[in-house]
Amino acid sequence: MSNATTGVSSSGGAQKVSKINEVVIRIAGNSQDGIQAIGGFLARLAGRSEQEVMTFMTIPATISGGASIFQVRMGSGEVLSSGDEADVLLAFYQHSYDAHIASLKKGGIVLFDSDHVVANEELKKTYHHLGIPISGLTVEAIGGTAKDKGKNIFALGLIAKMFDLNLPKLEKLIGERFTGKDPSILNNALAAFHAGHANPFGNVLETFKFVDAQKKDGHQVVMNGNEAIGYGLIAAGVRFGAGYPITPWTDIMELLRRELPKYGGCFIQTEDEIAAISMAIGGSYAGRVAVTGSSGPGISLKTEALGWAIMAEMPLVIIDVQRGGPSTGMPTNIEQSDLNIAVNGGHGDAPRVVIAPANVEDCFYMAIEAVNIARKYSVPVILLTDQGIATRIEAFVEPNLEKICQEIGPDFAPVADHKPYDLSAANGISHHVPPGTKINSGKYPIVTGLEHDELGHPTGSPKLHMQMTAKRRKKLQALGASLPLPKIYGPSEGNVLLVGWGSTEGPVKEAVDRARAAGDSVSSIHLRHINPLPNGLENIFSGFNHVLVVEMNDEGLYGFGQLGAILRARYCDAKIQGINKTDGLTWKVKEILERTKTNLSAGLSKI
Amino acid sequence: MSETLLAKPVVSTTTPPTEERKGLTKKEIAADHPTWCPGCGDFSVLALYFKLIEKRKMWHEKITTVAGIGCSSRFPYFVQAHGAHYIHGRALPFASGISLSRPDLHVFVFGGDGDAFSIGGNHFNHTARKNIKMTYCVMDNWVYGLTKKQTSPTSPLGFKSKTDIWGAIDYPINPLKQAIAAGATFVARTTHTNPNHVLQMMEAAMDHDGFSFIECLSECVEFYEGAFDASNPRKGGVFNEVPKSHDVTDEGAAYKLAGEDFPGHFGIFYKVNKPTKNAKEAEIIKNYQSKVTGQQPWQILQKNFDKMK
């Protein structure tokens, strides 16, 4: 909890009120306790209060039940990560208390359900302990027929009191959540919330008040990365797709299945992963960029069809929500170990586009960018996200949908002549003409996975294979030349440049902030376009003594992570090194800083 | 109102949908000269597809031919029309993507027994059960031809191939039973040696609203010569049509008929009318769109965003 510059002020009575900029709250319980609902309410409240917010959750890979946490960091200033340490721990069970008290900052507050948790006397010296019989009081408040139901909302009331949160806004959110259900459910929820809020614990402990947030331009919307991708695809004009359920990609296919009919489209659940990508490619062939997606093993299964789409030059968007691998791996954990398969997966020389959003807002915009690159270059585009970004909730400025939403319906206007693989096309970029289009020359195209001539007919000609291979490569080189260089966070010259990609943007930037505050010379860049890379990165690298690529994947046989190896191969620069980890959890800021220091034998030079 | 998959796409102002056109000639439909071996049964299937296009006055741009991998799957290259040569075994989901997003097209898929029943077996079952509108013509030659004589899923027991030099030991698939059991709504059998019958089956399959499956015996003269002689009167065999008394809507009777020993019968074994997946998806779209009548896509999306504020 960072105190505002105004410092601690007393409200004058028995109760102390401190002004704060931000807070990290970790809620620990079981997956069926509705702890995600508390986190969701807090995140949406922050969004409506023009505050910044970021969440982090773990879910067990079990079918039902199991320990689960939800961490919310909300504040009046910029929130870049979900926070290394919690200011407040809300523990529902003994196992929640035991497992998560170490995540609490020294001097932090542990709020626990004294009906289930016995506090450790030794730990009372380090942390403020506040035991409240949450289960019992909830039963008292709402009648206690449904066992354990409603205690999450009771706890939300406690938190609202502790942080002087806006009551009418929270009541409205609760109302929205339970609208349409049996009115007694909403009444119970509000009763539990008010009982929590009215709990007299505030008399024995200080409470907190956020300093006013900076005025944002326009409203904020609050959603997770999977939702942002789903809605981004709809905004981009995608109306057809196919998929197969696999965690953590499934949310996106559920959203598209549910939403697309409103737009005249549909999303098909197929018999397997190969059918899913094949059906999506069929949809693209029929005239409109289609989407498929998966996670982990599903991506492996799709690679043969992906190679076909590259060879046949079909536009396609493939979402890869990465999880821990290989094989079934760690289905509900975060890892960035699919970069290699995204960039190189499959047989043969098969260039495809790989882009990776940096945060939830970026998921929305990069989903649109993926569609537009696929259309413009007639190529499959892989949108590489991960379990962390998929499930975390952020608030961002509401997009102007009227301006952004685009129509990409197929064009069936007759053409005089058409070569699907026209070798004279500028930069190798030819376009697909869908069935239904009359071709006045009477020569119709075949799209194919066999090496082909300009009309798509098979050839064994060495010359054509070389020309067509070059054509497929040149398209990506043209795209690379058009990409903007990433902005440097911090000065453009110094000792250390941290290079991040995907969901690590926040912690990497926060590491730069902390290092610079301590007087160290650290900057960062974040790569959103992975394949092709933008041109000119060497000019950024030349400003630094060390380039450290921060990734959540293994250091590999030769000491470099997956992006690190690509950057070294491209720039042949020995100063490019890696900071890697595979614990299945998001980067903590302090981990990045410690690893940076150990990585540089000489230590960081002072400015 | 946003564009819907229900509505037929606007083709163009210069070719009004009501336009009367002459049927295409064989010369206009033929593309590359087929790469098949001389005497291959696939030639007659191709010739009859041309005949179907001519007879039914199909328009060039509306013909969509899809195939997977195999000798017979070279088919699209030989047809002067929109076509796709996809990967091994996956032609059906690819064709489903076209069928489900383009109600104005009828997709024809051609392939072989390995493509359909071995590597693509799962897709065959699911495309059939979902009743996705298209015609699937499997040119069954009981052998892998493109890779030069290995055992196929329809090779009879004892067939000597390069992977079973002592004779096939695995029980073969019965394509008709497989199709009926999977829920195909049109199941027919024909043979390349009876051209009129092939054309009849193709026409009936095209006119069927649903997943229509034709098993067309197509002899591989190179690697399984004489396989179907017993069904060819010119080779001393018998060509028995499905008895007139057979009720094509009787699943049990169709299954029984499909189980007869070779040469068995030829014709339509099973045909029922069930709503297609295409129609069911269109119904969902219609219901959902009726709730957002008059709204632009961005306005529909805005409603979702308003809930996330």
Image: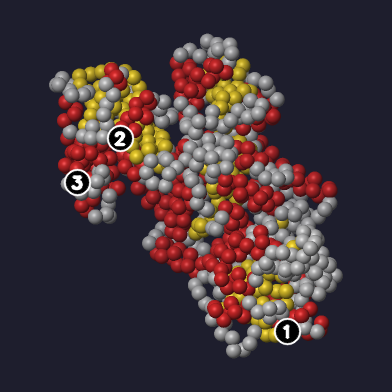
In this view of the protein, which residue sits in the foreground, B89 or A510?
Answer: B89
Residue B21 lies in quadrant? bottom right
> Is residue A175 visible from the viewing direction of this image?
yes
Which numbered disc, 3 or 2, marks the residue that appears first in the sequence?
2
Q: How many marks?
A: 3
Q: How crowded is mark 2: few (under 14 residues within 10 Å), some or many (20 or more)?
A: many
Q: What numbered label is drawn on residue A395?
A: none
- Chain for numbered disc 1: B
Residue identified by numbered label 2: A93
- Chain for numbered disc 2: A
Q: Residues within 10 Å of mark 3 (few under 14, many from 20)?
A: some
Residue identified by numbered label 3: A144
Q: Is mark 2 on a helix, strand or loop?
A: loop
- Where, quadrant-wise, is the N terminus of chain A in this rendering? top left
Rendering coords of residue A256 (x, y %): 47, 53
**Residue beneath the point at 16% across and 42% down:** A140
